[in-house]
Each structure stands twice: as structure tokens, then as C-alpha cells.
Amino acid sequence: MWRRGGDRKCNHKVKELQLEDQVKREGRRLARVGASIAKHLYTRNCSSLCGVRYIQSSRCHYMQPLFRQHAFRILYKGALMERHNFLSTMTTNNTTEEGSEQEETISVTFIDKDGEEKHIKVPVGMSMLEAAHENDIELEGACEGSLACSTCHVIVMDVEQYNKLEDPTDEENDMLDLAFGLTETSRLGCQVIAKPELDGIRLAIPAATRNFAVDGYVPKPH
Amino acid sequence: MFHLGAVLETLYCRKNQIPFVYFISSLIIMQNLVIFRARLCRSFSSISSNPLSVCVVGSGPAGFYIAEKMLKAHQQAQVDIIDRLPTPFGLVRSGVAPDHPETKIVINQFSRVAQHERCSFFGNVTLGSSVFLSELRELYHVVVLAYGAESDRSLGIPGENLKGIHSAREFVWWYNGHPDGRNLELELKSTDTAVILGQGNVALDVARILLRPTAELSTTDIAAHALATLQESSIRVVYLVGRRGPAQAACTAKELREILGIHNVDIFIQESDLLLNPVDEEELKSNRIQRRVYELLSKAATTKTEHTSLNQRELHFVFYRKPDSFQESKERASHVSGVHFEQTVLKGVSPGKQIAVGAGEFEDIKCGVVLKSIGYKSVPVDDLPFDHKKGIVPNDRGRVLRDPSDPSHLEKGLYVCGWLKRGPTGIIATNLYCAEETVSSISEDLEKGGLMSSSVFPKPGTNGLLQLLHDRNVRIVSFSDWEKIDAEERRLGSSKNKPREKLATWDELYKTIS
């Protein structure tokens, strides 16, 4: 549904600049990826960004608030791919793709409205809303990740995992106010971005409640 | 459809495996193929002639969520959505403020539903004149009413009919280019003060549109006539008046944060109004929305406003006042010149149940415009049970009840969703859960056989409706017609740097699709 692929190359220059900005802001995370990102930027070699994975990941680029995370993801991925290339120069493009994918995904478990679990791999940098949609998990996304609704509400099942997330912004909290079945560990799926520390995170999609008009309703834990 | 047909055919073959094998052995391959084809056609026609026909009245969020859930839950369902307007999406188009484009993104999802092969949109079809409820119930197995609330609650106080007093709904329709809101006689040039009664999100939307710099509005999809009037507006002071206190304000944090942040608007909140009684404190403790709204209001009250320019506009939050009467202007007969308010105090000991009662002291606020944002009201149609006190259709989880006091007395095949079902509150997503509830009621009734099996009692469905509307010379607006309107609006908007320029009169809408 979000497959708007298209030609993104014309925007490369702009994106490069945005990526550069991004790196400045994401200094902390930059440290994790280390010199490879820096090298990637300085050489301005964006060819690896044009790979298949990049085009897939860019399908939601028109969702502005997600862009930041996307940009980082692309950068992160580009860097990792480059490192991979460096280590195994003999591999074909395809295996490079697969290799890098293995390195940069985390395991996420979605628990749907009926309590059924679905295990998926989510590339680092991707939001849980996108990840759910790519894997046919029924998570609503009425505003398509623009932080204007509360329909992608998920409950983080493990407090420790919840604490690893950055605090919700005022804007996210404003939307969480209106989420059904809000809990202490509720977040919006579009704002939870896969990062290595979150590997193994379990997210429950709140069951639609019969008495939805009642304030303060807390769904039973699954 | 093809997929479904193929699956059914496979099942059919399995069931009749033995005779089928005999059959094959006695025929040459070509004949076999011919028969297979014939069977395939039979299974196709049996599906297409006996679908579960569903009619949804109203194409706002409630209607579209019902359609989406029905299509998903029932593979044989054919869903027709009718709307009295030539344009779909209800309040997403004519309710959501023009400066909230993100909220309207849900239109993408609704459009995909409308384009579903088992879904049709028929605009310009009015329940109660183009077609009657009794007819729809004859034509369809399931009728879901989701036509919302197109009227307003009234205060019932003296002077309510004076000129210059409008409902917020009328004002919202006007700035959102609703074809019935075009002719609102709104004067914003002859006064500098507007009073808005109510403090919910609609009230905040209305206040924001009045106060926001028009340069910021000019790049939204606000109606051209509204923008022109607002550009000439002399409104400088807006009062948002509530009967109860800041702990009971009905708005949400997002909208409040937004209005508190408008450029060049000073916020006035009496600090004494922020004092909480013990019940208020209980309420805030148990209600996150109210707590966060209260915190924002307290912060705004204590932040010293900087009077930076002479053109500064003012927004006053006034609590504990209830309108007693409207005052008539001495200079302009039958025109409002102010509101007479009575101060209130809160009575009641249980949290969430405090009510405002008059304290016997009065004061006036002079103004030239009053916008009543005290709630929408649904309007019944013929042959529909209606609870006039609550302003909703009596229902049991979406099943329409003939008699509200007797839940076993159901109107078979008739359901409600959205504001008509639960009253005019909530956000777009509320309708998602509301629709899930109604659809699960429908599914339960279908399973129980309460709605009879569609194959035993075929209903005319879409074809019957189209025939009836054709006989009555109703010009149906299809979804592809709407796409023409949509394209035209976007085209008109692009030259003005707006996402769209809404066609705001019936004539323009009809002309585009003729």
C-alpha cells in the first residue's frame, strides 16, 4: 500500500545534505557504527544507497516525521554494507544484501488482538508501524506515521525493553492520551524505531474493547 | 472474486470426487474442460447473485470503517456506501480543520476501501428523500446507519435567535467548504470580539481559525470564501467560555498546545480559576487527558505574556460561567451585542460527575459574534427508533432496538455506528472501535441465522438500489465522479499554493461531473 517506489535518485543531493545533518545530530549513535559511516560520508559515495533495500525502505519517505529515522537507517545500512563489501569483496551483490540484512535486523514479536504471536525480523532504523505492515500484521496506521492519530498504539510487554526507548515527545504523549487501552508501557508503533538494543522486543496490539467509551480501561495482559 | 470462485470450485470438486472421477474417465479431455468451465461459471454466478448485500448510510469515518471491517470479515459481502453529498469522507472533509492536514491522511485508507472490488460509493443519494429506510431494508440484508449528527444542540435561553449567533458546526462547515455552509451570514468586520461557548476541541478549532494569521491559513485547503472573509476580519479578542473549571475542560492536549502557541496571541487565564477542589484533584489523578490539559492551562496562566506589538490578538479562557441570555444590540435591531453570564460553582462529590450550578452572580461580555460549540445533534429519519433525549438511536452494541427498554426487541438487519450510535464525541479512531463492535454484532447475527442465509433469500442489493434511483431520476455520484472533483480541486489549489481549492457550492460540484 505504501509502494510508491519511483525515482529517488534526483533527490540525492538533498538527501546527502540531510544525511550529513543527521550524522551531526545522531552523534551518539554514530559512535556505534564508527569510522565506516564517517568514511562513507566523506567519500560521498552514495552508490550503495541506491541498492534495492534502499528503494524499499524509502517507500514511506513522504511521511515527514519518519524521515529522520529513515535517513539514519539508510546511512547506517550504507555504512554496514560498505564494511561488508570491504570484508568480502568477492561476494555478489545479492549475497551482500543478505549478509548485511542478517547483521542489521532485530527480532520483534507482535502479539495480535487474538493473543497470537508473530515473530518477525525488523531492519534497524525501521519503525514498528512499517515493520508490521511489511509483514501483514494488522496494525492500523490512519495518519501513516505523521503523529496525528493514535491508531498504531502498541504495548511494550517488557518494562526493561520499554525503558530502553527514548521518552515519548509531548506530541506523542498528546496522541497516546487518546489511545484505547492505554497502559504504562504504551507507545505509538510509528515512533518505536528498531535499534540493536531492542532485539527480542515484544509488542502487543491492544484488543478492541467492548466498553471503549469508558475512560481508563486497561486491557488484560496477554 | 476470481480467487473466491476458484477456491469454491476446488471445494466443490473435492466433495464430489468419486462421481467426478467416473465422469472424467468417460469423457475426452475437451469435453471435460467444457464441463469444468460450465461449473466454474455456475459457481461464479451463484456467488454474484447471492452476495451478502450491505448498505452503509454515510461515508464519514464510521461508514468507511464499517465498510472496511465488513469487507474483511465477510468475503461474500458487497458493500454499498451512500451519502447525501457528492463528496465522500464526511467530517474528515468538512469537520477536520484545514490546518490539520495530517489528520486527513486517513482519506488514503478510505479511498482504498472505496476502490475495493466489492465496495461501491453512491454520492448525492439522500436517505429520507432519494430513498427511504424501509426501502433500503427491503433491498439489503444489512443496513448500517452511520450518517452522524448534522444538527446542533441548543441552549434554550432568551435571545438565541439573534443575528450574529451561530453554531460552531455552521462555522466549521463554512470554512471547510461544505456546500450547505456556503451561505452563512457571518459578519467579522463590524466587531472586534467573538465569544465561543464551549471548550472542547471544536471550540478550540473555531478559536484558532479566528485568531491564526491568515497568511498561515492561506496555504491550507480552507474554503476561498472563508479565507477572504477572515482576511478582512476585525476580530481581535476571542473568549472561550466554559461552565466548569480547567479540570473539566473538554479539549485535548494537542489542540490546546497548538492554540497556546499561535503567533501574536496573548493568552489570558485567571489564576484563581486554577484552584482545585478535592474532587477535581481526584478527577485529575484518574484521567490522564484532563491532567495534561490542566497542566498546560496552569503553565499558560503563569507564563507572563509579552505585549510585543499593538496588533496583538487576545485569547481569554473563561471558566465557571454559564450563558443566561443573549443581549440585543441597541444600534442594530435583532443583532447580538453581548452575552449575559451567570457565575457557577461545581456541585457533586463523585469524580467526573460534578455539575455547574448558578451562583446567582452575573456579568456580561460584550461581543458582536457568538459561536455555540456545545455539541452536535443527530437527526432521525422516518421509521427509525430514536432516543430524543440522548440524541442517538437506541442500540445494543450497534443493533438497533425497537424499544430502548427491551434489548430483545431488535430491528432485524438494521445497525448503527458512529455518532448516531454513541453520540457526538470522540476522535476519528473512536469510530474504528465503534465499527468493530457493530461488525461483530452483525457477524454474530449472521452466524445465528438471525439475518437468514443470503443464498436462501437473495436480495436485490446494488442493482435494486440503482434501479430505484434511476426511476426517481437521482443523479448518482460514483467514486470515479468524486475522483474528477478531487482532481479539479487539486488543480484549482495548485495555482494558489493550496493542497486543494474546495468546490463549495452544489452547482460547482455538479458542473464538474456533468
Image: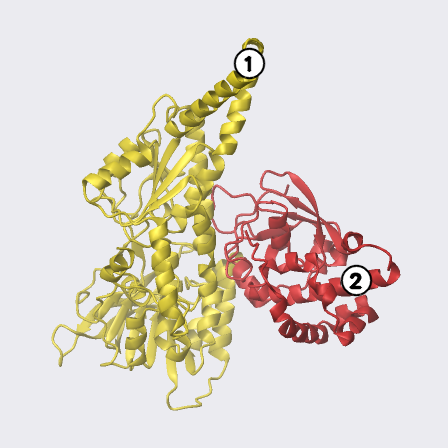
Chain colours: A red, B yellow
x 13%, y 72%: residue:
B334
Find residue B144 and report its horizontal and vertical position in percent. Answer: 35, 40
Q: Is residue B31 left or right of residue B159?
A: right
The one nearer the camera, B210 or A131, is A131
Q: State which quadrant residue A129 falls in.
A: bottom right
Label 1 belongs to which residue? B28
Q: Amino acid at mark 1?
A: Ile
x 32%, y 40%: residue:
B394
SS label for mark 2: helix
Q: Is residue A147 visible?
A: yes
Q: How far is disc 2 from disc 1 in space, using C-alphas? A: 62 Å
The one nearer the camera, A135 or A41, is A41
The one nearer the camera, B276 or B202, is B202
x 48%, y 84%: residue:
B304
Label 2 belongs to which residue? A80
The chain holding disc 2 is A
Q: Residues within 10 Å of mark 2 (few under 14, many from 20)?
A: many
The one nearer the camera, A146 or A219, is A146
Foreground disc of the pair 2, 1? 1
Question: Residue lying farthest left?
Answer: B333
x 42%, y 82%: residue:
B266
Find residue B350 and report its horizontal and vertical position in percent. Answer: 44, 53
Q: Residues within 10 Å of mark 1 (few under 14, many from 20)?
A: few
Q: Is residue B395 left or right of residue A11?
A: left
Q: Amino acid at mark 2?
A: Leu
Q: Are marks 2 and 1 on the same chain?
A: no
The chain holding disc 1 is B
